[in-house]
Amino acid sequence: MTYVYAVVSRRSNGVSIGINLNPNHACNWRCIYCQVPGLVRGKSPPIDLERLRTELDRMLEDVLHGDLLENEVEPSLRRLNDVAFSGNGESTTAVEFPEVVEIVGAALERHELVGKTKLVLITNGSMIETPRVQQALRRMAAFGGEVWFKLDRATKEGLSLVNSVKMDPADHIERLRLAASLCPTWVQTCMFELDGVPPPEAELSAYLDALRSVVEDGPPLLGVMLYSLARASHQPEAPRLNSVSREWLEALGLRVTALGLKVKVTP
Ligand code: SF4
């Protein structure tokens, strides 16, 4: 299939159906830990909506009523956990993103999955200011969806180093507030060692200050997902990167919890 795939996730204790709107491996960011092979700078190509609708229906039929899970998945994991926009690039760069959300939402309704199966948008958040993306987020909320919004660093230098974007961190925090005002939102943060050293305290303080500012006067957040490098980077910096330890990540998690936020730590 071009746009739809299924993966088994032990972490979520089930099967996830993924929707990839970037079969061209294009993203408007270049995170140095990105695991997309052959990543290029750019945006989604035009999406063939009919093809996506057909692929999703076929996948849902196979997962829910066919023998796909019986043949491929061990018994304890034979359940559909979520449908996620999680592709080889930034999904919201697709011009057709609002139409795609409608197609996915209608499929969830048809299969009576709304409220039972999570609909997730994994995003770097860069396109939230675009009216069509805001419209799509409102609709995601109506389908019981969640946004997982990337906030790795909160200084200009950190964003440039880690995500390869020139951006004022205050602008990105505004995007986070906007996302959370439109659809329930988790922050997702990747922490890792670069050249054997974890992020410096100045970066961590800026990050915690940014979260605190949203806690104090922003819309509520669902919480923060803290994780490290689950899979190898496909970027030139890969040899310079290492996971941080569980203890390091949990210590940061305690500092986030102290802000009044729920935290999920995945080393
Ligand atoms: S935003 Fe996601 S897809 Fe884009 S470069 Fe970063 S990790 Fe890769």
Image (cartoon, helix red, strand yellow):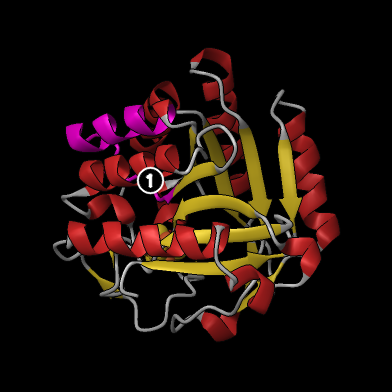
Label 1 is placed on what type of residue?
Answer: Ala
Extreme-top residue of the structure: 217
In this rendering, position of residue 236 left or right of residue 94: right
Q: How many numbered callouts?
A: 1
Q: Position of residue 77 (x, y in %)?
A: 74, 62
What residue is rendered at 50% in x and 65% in y?
A: 62
Name the quadrant containing residue 76.
Answer: bottom right
| 140 is within the stretch colored magenta | yes
Does the image show residue 52? yes
Q: Position of residue 195 (x, y in %)?
A: 62, 77
| 83 is within the stretch colored magenta | no
Most foreground residue, 136 or 219: 136
Extreme-right residue of the structure: 247
User: Alpha-carbon neighbours of circle 1 within 10 Å: few (<14), some, or many (≥20)?
Assistant: some
Does the image show residue 154? no
Q: Is 211 rendered above or below residue 204?
A: above
Q: Is 4 rendered above or below residue 235?
A: above
What residue is rendered at 23% in x and 53% in y?
A: 93
What residue is rendered at 17% in x and 66% in y?
A: 45
Most foreground residue, 171 or 122: 122
Tag 1 residue: 107
Residues rendered magenta in the picture:
122-141
Q: Is 207 rendered above or below residue 38?
A: above
In this rendering, position of residue 183 left or right of residue 128: right
